Image: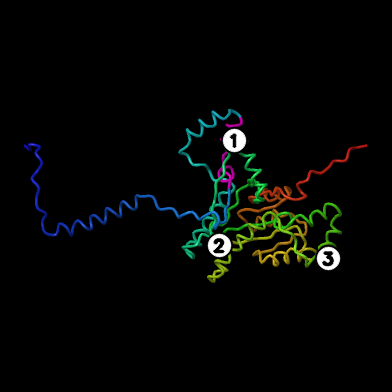
Amino acid sequence: MESGKPPEPREPGPGAETAAVPRWAEAKTFHDNLAPKKKPKSPKPQNAVTIAVSSRALFRMDEEQRIYAEQGVEEYVRYQLEHENEPFSPGPAFPFVKALEAVNRQLRELYPDSEDLFDIVLVTNNHAQVGVRLINSINHYGIAAATVFSPSRDVAVSQSQLRVAFDGDAVLFSDESERIVKAHGLDRFFEHEKAHENKPLAQGPLKGFLEALGRLQKKFYSKGLRLECPIRTYLVTARSAASSGARALKTLRSWGLETDEALFLAGAPKGPLLEKIRPHIFFDDQMFHVAGAQEMGTVAAHVPYGVAQTPRRTVPMK
């Protein structure tokens, strides 16, 4: 029978120290694999292209919103606490954010020390008055914003290439030409655009975003990766190539910008073409085109800018 007294210490035998080294290295490797991977350092805001995404665009929260609307905030909070370990399902902006992250990974490989990256910020609302203050701040600083709408059906999009599509007037450009259409009709619009073909349009709210995308594209071009660039941009406009498209292209050229493809639809619906392009997000100022994109499975964002946002006056019946 053993007495329970600890055994006398023994001198280590020959080779004990060398045998301990591989065991220690093996243990360290095992520990390192268990430890969470170090996340890439976030870039400084002044160096990054900041993309703010609301929680309800990034994740599907339909059930939570139903509870909030029907049962109130207390039940809403209780439900969230009970399900806090259950991940939300991806929302309409989720593939867009994943594509941004894919671009960031490639940029970090090519430029390890650069902070010229996408910085993704999640925005959520805590109180109605905070929301009002946020809107007022956005209007004060002129930060481009849009309301994201979920598509009517799911369409697979690229997981390795970010694709962004823009409308022209009142999105990339000002609403100068659109005002002429509203006030005087298409014939006068065509005459105006032909006469001012060489005069650049003023910038619209999303011009800065296209500019940022173009700057990041050039970082790939400088490495000889134009064809492999993980960012692709599209101009999708109701303008006609023959009668009013030249001014749009010359405006982009005057800014030192370009899009990978410029598609002039001459008033045709945009939804079917967007279904072929399959962008992660499409920006337009008119809800008619946003709805058409939704029907064909495109995540569309409404840009609340320009004359198209002015409510139509109804003429009283005599």
> What's the CA distance linking mark 3 and mark 2?
38 Å
Residue pointed to by mark 2: 230
- Which comes sooner in the sequence, label 3 or label 2? 3
Residue pointed to by mark 1: 127
- Which comes sooner in the sequence, label 1 or label 3? 1
For this orientation, the residue located farthest to the left is: 1
> What's the CA distance linking mark 1 and mark 3?
51 Å
Q: What amino acid is found at the position of numbered circle 3 in the picture? A: Ala
Q: Does the magenta stretch include residue 174?
A: no
Residue 312 position, x and y percent, is 81, 44
Check disc 1: other Cα within 10 Å, few if <14, some if 14-19, many if 20+: few
Residue pointed to by mark 3: 195
Q: In which quarter of the image is residue 28?
A: bottom left
Tell me whether the residue at label 3 lies in contact with that at label 2, contact meaning CB atoms closer than 8 angstroms. Answer: no
The secondary element bearing badge 3 is classed as helix
Q: In this view, does 80 lie above or below 268?
A: above
Q: In which quarter of the image is residue 4?
A: top left
